[in-house]
Amino acid sequence: MTALCLIELDGAEPADVSLRALTLARSLGGDVNAVLFADAAPQVTLASYGVTAAYLVEPSALEGYAPLAWARVLAALAAETGATAVLAAGTDRGHEVLAHLGAITALPMAANCTQVTPDGQGAHRLVRQRWAGLLLEDAVLEAPVALLTVATDAVPAVSAETPAAIQVHVHKPELAEADLRVRAAESPAGAGGMSLATARVVVGGGRGVGGPDGFAPLEELAELLGGVVGVSRVVTSEGWRPHKQQVGQTGTKITPELYLACGISGAIQHIAGCAGAKHIIAINTDPGAPILAHADYAVVGDLHQVIPALVTALRTR
Amino acid sequence: MDILVCVKRVPTVGGKIAVTPDGQEVDTRMSGFSVSPHEECAVEEAVQITERLGGTVSVLTLGPEASVDQLRDALALGAGRAMLLDTGGREFGPIATAAAIAAEVREHGYDLVLLGNEAADTGDYQVGIRLAHELGWPVATGIKNLSASPDRVVARREYRGAEEAYELALPAVVTVKEGINLPRYPSLPGRLRAKRAAIERSSPAWAPEGLRKEALRVPASSQHQATVLGNGVDAVPDLVRVLDELGVLS
Ligand SMILES: Cc1cc2nc3c(=O)[nH]c(=O)nc-3n(C[C@H](O)[C@H](O)[C@H](O)COP(=O)(O)OP(=O)(O)OC[C@H]3O[C@@H](n4cnc5c(N)ncnc54)[C@H](O)[C@@H]3O)c2cc1C
Ligand SMILES: Nc1ncnc2c1ncn2[C@@H]1O[C@H](COP(=O)(O)O)[C@@H](O)[C@H]1O
């Protein structure tokens, strides 16, 4: 039994979401193989997550991101290795590549799984997120190859007890021109900045911030904590902040060490985006706000006073 | 440009989400219905494109008879034609859904089909891509910026802080996300027109799929009550101590 896992990279290392996917792949109980679109494999990390074979598709063979071409590579490698499962992280790319794979192989695809168990008779029992994680679904996936994406905020990344002996293979894909018809032109503009999805600290601002001019102290605090600002949907639909900063069901899912939610009530669609935070601290004038039922700590008070005072205290430390 | 937008009727989830006793669906006794914000934006995007380039906007839903409400909402926003693919209350999986939409696209012919990136209820993340494969058209997903010209679109999204741009020759499929635009409110004449508009109907074939739902459930709650550190600025010293304990002060 082999599970083939698409690895997305963060620099030269596997992205945290891909380590989570590898953790779920290992839980299936068979061999774990990795596929990377890169010219070198982060062997030590992959081995520590139990990967026994890594397949490299080098930029000379396939440059950049082309979703259908990536799916063709997964299809070819799944056939070559006899994989019974193909996994990817539940990211834009992971969902996209696995959906293409589902379409070209005429197989079903289960998105945002949190738990998967082979039933011993060729099918898989699984649990997956529905409603952006507000609900879970128990399901059965009957397919010769299980196509799965792994929820980015629910499965913690855990390395194997003992590292695997890993072999690295260079895979030369056979692609048709049509496979490359849709291809990303990547521009670093805006890159380099820390992304909301991967930030270690997120300072959240909601309606309580009061307007577009109220965010300067939150920015300052985020910078002091080495983090970024995230916002609620009220803030983006009022046009106070761009949508790319929105946390929640229809925004970004975050998994920071700390989420500091300021002037945010904690509607369930917002919680759907921040439930993966390790710790939550709320600053809210209303001690009855729903966010307090999800937070570890709270300060009851006006964020316009508390945040500047906190910034001052941190600066004078 | 002739554009088709696909929307799906889903329960409007308010302060709480609950499941029916048989675990088969969301309890809607206390809720209304709507379409996902991604799909509202898809309708708005289509209307904006045709305002600029000319053409038509059609809207389609596959669902029970009651989904006519969601079609009328889209008509009120500027769509000109609406189709109900009546499921008779049966749950269609993503493969059958894409096949049914593809049949309509083949019959009528469009330059561009817009969908949401994912449906609010199933979150399957695949109907748009399966549709594109059925049609042999190019597809881009998760799009938050679209510029259309008569024969092509450039679709943009963000990936790990960098921008990706996809150029697609038409006809094409694009799935969009909230944030691509700010949807307008329906006008009064729009509402009146929507109320009177005819709805075209058909009944697509259902087929079983390999992914079978057994039950939905609310995740075991991590709810607790936060430790209140204090009121206002007096709580700041304790707040600093907690931040230090959590290891976020470098
Ligand atoms: C389909 C759908 C999808 C959605 N997707 C998202 C999503 O992705 N993300 C999202 O965030 N929402 C989403 N929403 C909206 C969500 O339901 C809420 O409306 C929204 O999250 C509320 O934002 P808020 O907490 O900023 O505002 P409010 O609910 O108005 O809360 C403001 C809070 O600020 C507090 N406050 C006010 N003044 C101060 C002050 N001076 N100091 C401290 N606290 C103060 C108040 O006590 C209150 O708790 C979605 C809704 C739907 C229907
Ligand atoms: N029953 C349906 N009727 C119309 N459009 C649908 C339906 N199901 C899915 N879609 C479209 O496909 C998108 C992605 O859905 P999904 O792949 O199910 O997450 C949705 O945002 C809709 O635009």
Image (cartoon, coloured by chain):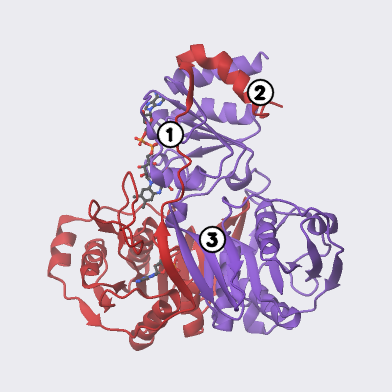
Whether residue B171 is visible, yes or no, is no
Q: In this rendered view, identify the residue nearer to me: B156 or B248.
A: B248
Residue on which disc 2 sits: B244
Q: Name the subunit of mark 1.
A: A
Q: Position of residue A211 (x, y in %)?
A: 40, 31
Q: In this rendered view, identify the residue nearer to me: B15 or A208.
A: B15
Query: Which dot, 1 or 2, sits closer to the camera?
Result: 1
Residue on which disc 1 sits: A293
Q: Secondary structure at mark 1?
A: helix
Q: In this rendered view, identify the residue nearer to me: B84 or A115.
A: A115
Query: Which dot, 1 or 3, sits closer to the camera?
Result: 1
Q: Colour of chain B?
A: red
Give the image quarter of residue B29.
Answer: bottom left
Q: Is mark 2 within 8 Å of ligand 1?
A: no
How many numbered callouts?
3
Amino acid, disc 2: Asp
Spatial CA distance of label 1 from label 3 is 25 Å
From the image, which quarter does the N terminus of chain B lie in?
Answer: bottom left
Q: Residue at x 51, y 15 (%)?
A: B235
Spatial CA distance of label 2 from label 3 is 34 Å
From the image, which quarter does the C terminus of chain B lie in?
Answer: top right
Q: Residue at x 64, y 51 (%)?
A: A189
Q: Give the vertical position of B204 relative to B78 (above or below).
A: below
Amino acid, disc 3: Asn
Can you tell which chain is drawn purple?
Answer: A
Q: Secondary structure at mark 2?
A: helix
Q: Residue at x 24, y 68 (%)?
A: B67
Q: Name the subunit of mark 2.
A: B
For residue A112, the mark is 3
Q: Position of residue B166 (x, y in %)?
A: 57, 67
Q: Position of residue A86 (x, y in %)?
A: 65, 71
Q: Residues within 10 Å of mark 2 (few under 14, many from 20)?
A: few
